[in-house]
Image: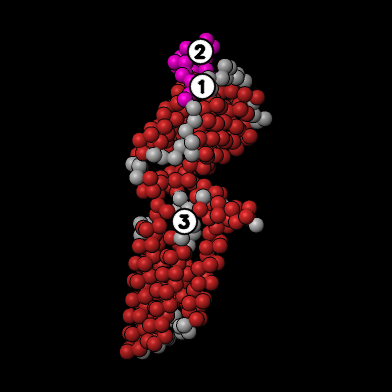
């Protein structure tokens, strides 16, 4: 029993473990938010309480990182407020003018306008505004009493969703670290495979495509990581650039080996450097000092492969130095 309680506590409060169980944790959070909405609207007998529950599902959205929750919360609240007010205005004009075709045209025009702005900056606000307009106004045939209660339900649902969004959120910094570590481990595996040779060009292309796919999500996390850690985003952009250079160098080395049948020769420490950084990122503990690298171009073997290998080892050393600087100057867990 104590072991079960300890494991549950770890998943709830150890953010690294919470990242690894992010989907399960988010599913539980949404389920609890749904139960809270049902209990609140049913317990005090709020008319049309199901719209509060629907709003919870619409607003709580995907898994949020701690670094962007405030911005997303502001967008959600603003989109909901705009949609509710516009929906009420549609109901009022329908009540006074009694022209359904005009109401339909206005609703279509408003939702089209929101759709136009949903593609681009502020798109989430526009999308939520359009959804809230339809929830509040229906097809324009609601009476003002029902529209007011639907508006109240929308705000109740939004409030519940925001409360549960802030409850034990995932941290973008942990996500960034674990994803970068996975990229470095995958790069080490590709380098190891290069020593024995890829089976064919298709296997080589698949391996390089996998590395590129792993790199892409890291850039989207950088703004949130910067906000969480108070580290300038430029620092993480430099590390992103170093990871991209690593992939490009591996791709060039693999292409040369595939075309010429030559091998890299003496290993300048590429794989150990990749695995050491990956382990440090996963554990949050700085590794032991790295041994000094031989200067680029001192390799006895002629040809491009040894030079590229030593250049890549030097690039990895600089990448590790940046991570060490983040740890020493900004307290970044590495």
Q: Magenta segment, which residues?
A: 289-308
- Residue 201 in view: yes
Residues at marks 2 and 1 touching, judged by CB atoms closer than 8 Å: yes
Q: Earlier in the sequence, mark 2 or mark 1?
A: 2
Residue where numbered disc 3 is placed: 169
Q: Is residue 322 magenta?
A: no
Residue 123 appears in view: no
From the top left corner, tell me how far across and down residue 50 is, in percent: 50, 78
Q: Nearer the viewer, mark 2 or mark 3?
A: 3
What residue did someone put label 2 on? 299
**Mark 3 neighbour density, 10 Å: few (under 14) some (14–19) many (20 or more):** many
Question: In the image, 182: left or right of 79?
Answer: right
Marks 2/1: CA–CA distance:
10 Å
Question: Magenta segment: does it hold 296?
Answer: yes
Quick one: which residue is furthest to the front in this view?
Answer: 2
Q: Residues within 10 Å of mark 2 (few under 14, many from 20)?
A: some
Do the residues under discs 1 and 3 have CB atoms within 8 angstroms?
Answer: no
For marks 2 and 3 on the same chain, the one whose residue lies earlier in the sequence: 3
State which quadrant residue 155 falls in. bottom left
Secondary structure of the residue carrying numbered label 3: loop
Q: Quadrant of residue 186?
A: top right
């Amino acid at each position: 029993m104590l072991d079960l309680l300890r494991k549950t506590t770890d998943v709830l409060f150890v953010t690294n473990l919470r990242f690894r169980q992010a989907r399960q944790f988010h599913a539980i959070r949404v389920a609890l938010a749904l139960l809270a909405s049902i209990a609140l609207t049913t317990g005090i007998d709020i008319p049309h309480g199901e719209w509060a529950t629907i709003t919870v599902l619409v607003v709580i959205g995907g898994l949020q990182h701690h670094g962007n929750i405030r911005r997303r919360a502001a967008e959600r609240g603003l989109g909901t407020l705009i949609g509710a007010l516009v929906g009420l205005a549609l109901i009022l004009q329908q009540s006074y003018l009694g022209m359904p075709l005009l109401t339909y045209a206005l609703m279509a025009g408003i939702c089209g306008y929101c759709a136009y702005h949903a593609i681009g900056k502020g798109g989430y606000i526009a999308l939520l505004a359009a959804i809230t307009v339809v929830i509040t106004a229906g097809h324009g045939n609601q009476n003002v009493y029902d529209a007011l209660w639907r508006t109240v339900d929308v705000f109740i649902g939004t409030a519940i969703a925001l409360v549960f969004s802030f409850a034990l959120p995932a941290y973008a910094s942990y996500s960034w670290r674990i994803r970068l570590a996975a990229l470095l481990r995958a790069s080490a595996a590709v380098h190891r495979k290069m020593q024995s040779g890829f089976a064919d060009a298709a296997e080589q292309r698949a391996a390089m495509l996998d590395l590129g796919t792993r790199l892409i999500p890291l850039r989207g996390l950088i703004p949130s990581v910067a906000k969480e850690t108070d580290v300038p985003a430029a620092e993480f952009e430099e590390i992103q650039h170093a990871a991209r250079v690593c992939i490009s160098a591996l791709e060039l080395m693999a292409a040369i080996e595939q075309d010429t049948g030559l091998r890299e020769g003496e290993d300048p420490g590429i794989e150990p450097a990749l695995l050491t950084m990956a382990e440090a990122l996963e554990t949050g503990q700085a590794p032991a000092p790295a041994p000094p690298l031989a200067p680029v171009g001192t390799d006895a073997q002629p040809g491009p492969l040894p030079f590229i290998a030593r250049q890549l080892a030097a690039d990895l050393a600089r990448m590790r130095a940046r991570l060490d600087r983040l740890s020493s100057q900004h307290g970044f867990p590495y």
